[in-house]
Image: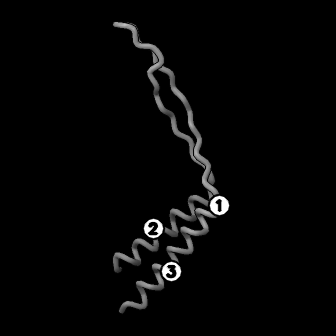
């Protein structure tokens, strides 16, 4: 399989995942207080929303790369 076709498949999978999940969360640890030997941290949860257009564009680009990879034979 050609590298352009592999990239197309990866973009299609990422696009389908973006359409299925539409948001993901992650946790960061932030230093709140640091006075000498005393240190306090807090965990903050952040959420990133993925618009459906991003998934659709990714799938379209993946299909275009698959077609371009098939035509270059």
Q: Nearer the viewer, mark 2 or mark 3?
A: 3
Identify the residue under disc 1.
52
Mark closest to the chain's N terminus, 3 or 1: 1
Image quadrant where residue 50 sits:
bottom right
How many numbered marks are there? 3
In primary-sequence order, the first of circles 2 and 3 is 2
- Locate residue 29, reporting x and y percent: 46, 27
Q: Quadrant of residue 19?
A: bottom right
Q: Which residue is mark 3?
A: 64
> Residue at point 61% right, 68% down?
56
Instruction: Name the residue rendered at 59%, 62% in the picture.
Output: 54
Q: Residues within 10 Å of mark 1 (few under 14, many from 20)?
A: some
Residues at marks 1 and 2, CA–CA distance in whole angstroms: 17 Å
At which x and y percent is residue 62?
A: 50, 74
Q: CA distance from mark 3 to mark 1?
A: 19 Å
- In x, y percent, where is residue 40? 45, 14
Q: Secondary structure at mark 3?
A: helix
Instruction: Decide: is 37 above or below 52.
Output: above
Give how far across and how far down residue 7 sits, in percent.
41, 71
Residue at image location 39% in from the left, 73% down from the top:
6
Say what secondary structure mark 2 lies in. Answer: helix
Q: Which mark is residue 10?
A: 2
Which one is closest to the eye, mark 1 or mark 2?
1
Q: Residues within 10 Å of mark 3 (few under 14, many from 20)?
A: some
Name the residue located 56 percent from the left edge and 37 percent from the top edge: 46
Residue 25 image label: none
Frontmost residue, 36 versus 28: 36
Q: Looking at the rendering, which quadrant does residue 71 occupy?
A: bottom left
Sequence-wise, which precedes: disc 1 or disc 2?
2
Task: Determine the residue located farthest toward the right in the rendered image.
Answer: 52
């Amino acid at each position: 399989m050609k590298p352009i076709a592999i990239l197309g498949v990866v973009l299609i999978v990422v696009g389908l995942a973006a359409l299925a999940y539409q948001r993901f969360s992650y946790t960061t640890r932030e230093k709140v207080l640091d006075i000498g030997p005393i240190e306090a941290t807090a965990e903050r949860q952040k959420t990133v929303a993925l618009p459906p257009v991003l998934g659709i564009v990714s799938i379209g680009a993946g299909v275009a790369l698959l077609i371009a990879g098939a035509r270059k034979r």
